[in-house]
Image (cartoon, grey):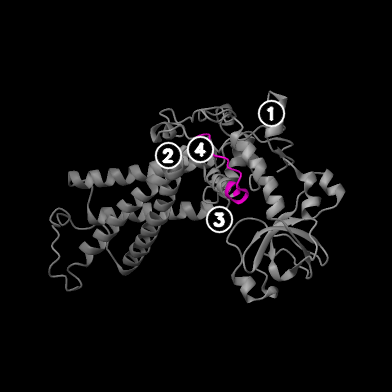
Amino acid sequence: MNFLSTFVTFENLHEVRRLCHWGPVIALSVIAICSTMAILDSIIWYWPLDTTGGSINFLMLINWTVLILYNYFNAMFVGPGYIPLGWKPENQQDTQYLQYCRVCQGFKAPRSHHCRKCNRCVIKMDHHCPWINNCCGHQNHAYFTSFLLLAPLGCSHAAIIFIMTMYTQLYERISFGWSTVKIDMSAARQFQPLMPFSVPAFAATLFALGLALGTTIAVGMLFFIQMKVILRNKTSIESWIEEKAKDRIQHYQTGEEFIFPYDLGTRWLNLKQVFTWTGTPKGDGIEWPVHSKCHQHSLTIEQLKQKADKRVRSQVQYQAVEDYNGACCPLSKGLQTFFRTPCTEEPRIALCKGDTILATRGTKWWMYGDKVINEEQMIAGERIRGWFPRRCVEKCHYDTAASDSTSDKKVN
């Protein structure tokens, strides 16, 4: 009992709840279906105990499954690492360069961002991934990227097994007119299959083939996107910050030169910041090696400039003219609003007629912004923001967003 208690703690049980989400349920279902069907089909197609090739094929298949699950669960349960609640820099003067998070009641360290899903400030946050129901950040970035590499490799192997199984089993039953196709199947025909390849088996194999090919393409693209930012020692969020920095400099013609502070100059050095032999990433998540022309707060200063610029350029004041209950797909607001709902886990905000909203972005049918709250809610640290139907609001003829938001400096 004592042995089990060292592993099963309250914190561990809390983390297990991450499995109870549509993302992990779908991801693990795809892994289970592809792995199970690949194992069964490899027994039908290439019996592992009769030939060396069959044994190698079977062992590689098991190896892919183990490695994929190992990196997947590490990415989920190790987590990205979080900034301690109420964190402050050792040098109090550095607080002027940092943003303050009302939710965590502390300052955001360089490269950290607040995740509304995890409700914490995440160290070197890349993004919140619904497939692992956790953030991808400093501690689990290598595990997550390894999973993105191994999943397409394993699915590609499984897809080959599915195709060869269907080909060998149907070759003599149905004439496809493939007179020019010549495949040596002598090794695979040295035994009689232990399991019949029936119509349900064919349908299941065909379904698993579709999953394997779709996963290979989709996850493979995500892997290349991740490697593109890793080789520059960036995150997806920091790539977006860099683009906005260039846009801000060009818009105001300031003549500044923006240098991304964490690019160490070579892809190899950047790669080693994420991937290490021990599996533990370099750094404590607070201080980072930076470019010779930059310092620890170069990026945070740029973020503060972009926050101020956003208040001036982006926020437009709207007033609600219709009630909205916060539904994800409100049919009562029109078919276009129903079908064009944003494909995101970001929240929707309920509106009452007369509410004031500061909109920051939007689409043709939806808008995203902050609801203007009263002073008591502001003191309590509340913030209400999310998506709402565009038809529910009208633009105010006057805009006091700039004056109302001056008190929001350096906050989450």
Tell which of 247 and 117 is nearer to you: 247
Secondary structure under tag 2 reads loop
Q: Tell me the SS state at disc 4.
A: loop
Tell me what residue is drawn at x 64 percent, y 48 percent: 117
Percent x, y of residue 73:
49, 42
**Precedes in sequence: disc 4 or disc 3:** 3
Alpha carbons under labels 1 and 2: distance apart: 29 Å
Residue designated by label 3: 22
Q: Tell me the magenta residue range.
A: 248-262
Q: Quadrant of the C terminus?
A: top right
> In this rendering, which labeled residue sits more in front, label 1 or label 2?
1
Q: Are marks 4 and 3 in contact (CB under 8 Å)?
A: no
Q: Residue 140: give its label.
A: 4
Please say if 179 is above or below 377: below
> Which kind of residue does numbered mark 3 sit on?
Trp
Tell me the kind of residue under disc 2. Leu
Distance in Å between CA atoms under marks 4 and 1: 28 Å
Q: Position of residue 322 (x, y in %)?
A: 78, 70
- Quote the CA–CA distance across marks 4 and 3: 21 Å
Residue at x 35% of width, y 44% of height:
64
Residue, disc 1? 94
Q: Residue 231 got which mark?
A: 2
- The image shows a total of numbered marks equal to 4
Write the residue at 57% across / 52% down.
21
276 relative to 404 in the view: left or right: left
Q: Position of residue 180 (x, y in %)?
A: 12, 67
